Amino acid sequence: MPEEPPPPVHIAVIMDGNGRWAKERGLPRREGHRAGAESVRRCVEACKELGVRYLTLYAFSSENWNRPPAEITALMTLLERFLEQKAEEMMRQNVRLQAIGHLERLPDKTRRKLEAAIERTAANDSLTLVLALSYGSREEITEAARSLVREAAAGRLGPDEVTPERLAGYLYTAGIPDPDLLIRTSGEMRLSNFLLWQISYAELVIFKKFWPDFGESDLFEAVGEYSRRHRRFGGL
Ligand code: IPE
Ligand code: IPE
Ligand code: MG
C-alpha cells in the first residue's frame, strides 16, 4: 500500500458566493452571509479532523469597503456575533484565532471583540484559524516595502539585505507557513487580491457551488484532489 500523503499544513479559502446564494432564494444578501457563517463552522470541524494546522478564511477584503454601507454593517454585526459565539467553542476545540489585514480600519466595537477572542484563544494549539479582515494583498506588500524603506532610512538595512525572507517577515502573515491549498467557491477563476505573495506555490481548487453550500465533504474532496497533485516547486 502506498503511504497516505500528508494533509496540507495550511488551507486558505476565498469564501465567495453568499450574495448569489441568497439571490437564488429571493432572500436579502445578509441571509447569504448568515448561512455562510455556518459553512465556516463546518470547515473548521473538517480541518480539525484532518489535522490541518492553519485555516485562513478571506472574510472581508479591502475592496469590500466599497459595498453599500448597509451590507458592510450587516457583515460587521455578523462578525461580532460570530466572535462572541465562537470564542467559547474555540476554547472547547483548542482552536487559536488570529487575524490578518488592515484591522485598524474595522469599527472599534468589532475590533475590540476580535482582539478579545484572539487573546482568549492565544494558548490553544490544535488548529489556527486566521481571519482575513479588511485584507488586501497589495496593501500588505506595500506596507512591508514601507517598513523596509524605514529601516533603510534609519541606516539599519542595506540593499543586499532585502531578501524574500526579510520581506515576508513584514507581511501580516509573518510566522505563518504559506498555504499549500487554495480553495475558491462559486466558480470565479481569480484571486481578488488575496495572499498574492504567499500562494506562489499553492495548489488551486475551484468549486462551482456557492460558499453557503460548502460542507465538510467538499473540504475532504479538495484535500483528496490536493493529495493527488504532484507538487514540483519548479524542480522535476
Ligand atoms: C462572499 O460573498 C462574502 C464577502 C465577500 C464578504 P459575496 O458577498 O461576494 O457574494 P457574491 O459573490 O456577491 O455572490
Ligand atoms: C473576495 O470576494 C473577497 C472575499 C471572499 C471576502 P469578492 O466577491 O469581493 O471578489 P470579486 O469582487 O468577485 O473579485
Ligand atoms: Mg463575491
Image: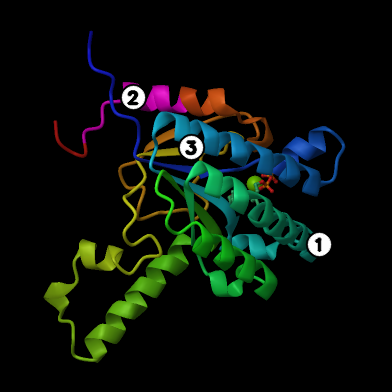
The percent position of residue 5, horizontal first and vertical second, equals: 28, 24
The colour style of the image is rainbow
- Residue 79: % across, % down: 67, 56
**Amino acid bearing label 1:** Ala
Q: Residue at x 54, y 51 (%)?
A: 58
Instruction: Out of 144 and 44, give the one closest to the viewer.
Output: 44
- Expressed as whole percent of the image width and height from the top left, the position of residue 31 reads 80, 44
x, y percentage for residue 133?
A: 56, 60
Q: Label 1 vs label 2: CA separation? A: 41 Å
**What residue did someone put label 3 on?**
183
Amino acid residing under circle 3: Ile
> What whole-number distance in Å separates the C-alpha atoms at marks 2 and 3?
14 Å
Look at 77% across and 57% down and name the residue there. 74
Helix, strand or loop status at disc 1: helix
Q: Is residue 75 visible?
A: yes
* Residue behind mark 1: 70
Q: Nearer the viewer, residue 47 or 121?
A: 121
Q: Are marks 2 and 3 in contact (CB under 8 Å)?
A: no
Q: Is residue 209 above or below residue 80?
A: above
Please report the bounds of the magenta region as a residue range: 222-232
Amino acid found under the numbered disc labelled 2: Ser
Report which residue position mark 2 lands on.
Answer: 227
Is-magenta flag for residue 224?
yes
The quarter of the image holding the C terminus is: top left
Q: Is mark 3 within 8 Å of ligand 2?
A: no
- For the N terminus, which image quadrant? top left
